[in-house]
Amino acid sequence: MLRIVVAKPGLDGHDRGAKVVARALRDAGHEVIYTGLHQTPEQIVETAIQEDADLIGLSVLSGAHMTLFRRLIALLQERDAADIVVFGGGIVPDEDVAPLEEIGVAKIFTPGATTGEITTWVEEHFAQQGS
């Protein structure tokens, strides 16, 4: 079982998608910690470290994805927690996916991704870690 922090950074107040993903990951057998709305990257990293998380999933619909992901990755590195895998989803233009992957985001799920795609990706890439 993996421990996954699902978070909504920034001022975006729409969390239905994040809750759906959190439930799907929980239903797939993972332990999920949902941080709630309006979290700072600092709060998210602190929660992930305290909870000994394997992954952090960010839901970003505000358009601030480049800034938020970059800050989160930098904080994980500063805290010697770069082994926590970061993935995310939301409204991320196709041209921003590669730059996010270059800074260390493992996967971006764009609008239309199904919960099955997300849970399958987690299983295929991290099942051995959580065992």
Image: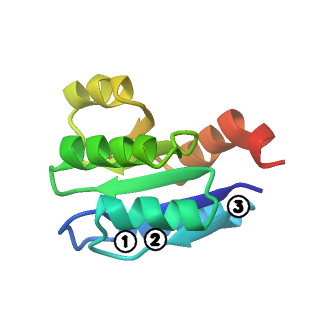
Mark 3: which amino acid?
A: His
Residue 47 position within the rendered picture, expressed as x and y whole percent measured from the top left? 49, 67
Residue pointed to by mark 3: 30
Per the rendering, the mark at residue 108 is: none
Residue 128 position within the rendered picture, expressed as x and y whole percent measured from the top left? 80, 38
Secondary structure under tag 2 reads helix
> Crowding near pointer 3: few (<14 within 10 Å), some, many (20+)?
some
Q: Please name whichever residue, 120 or 30, is drawn nearer the observer in this view of the structure.
A: 30
Answer whether labels 2 and 3 touch (C-beta < 8 Å): no
Q: Quadrant of residue 78?
A: top left
Residue at 26 percent across and 71 percent down: it is 14
Q: Is residue 52 visible?
A: yes
Secondary structure under tag 3 reads loop
Q: Is residue 21 visible?
A: no
Q: How is the image coloured?
A: rainbow
Mark 1: which amino acid?
A: Arg
Answer whether labels 1 and 2 touch (C-beta < 8 Å): yes
Instruction: Specify which label sits upstream in the sequence, 2 or 3.
Output: 2
Residue pointed to by mark 2: 19
> Crowding near pointer 1: few (<14 within 10 Å), some, many (20+)?
few
Nearer the observer, disc 1 or disc 3? 3
- Could you tell whether 82 is left or right of 100 in the image? right
Per the rendering, the mark at residue 16 is: 1
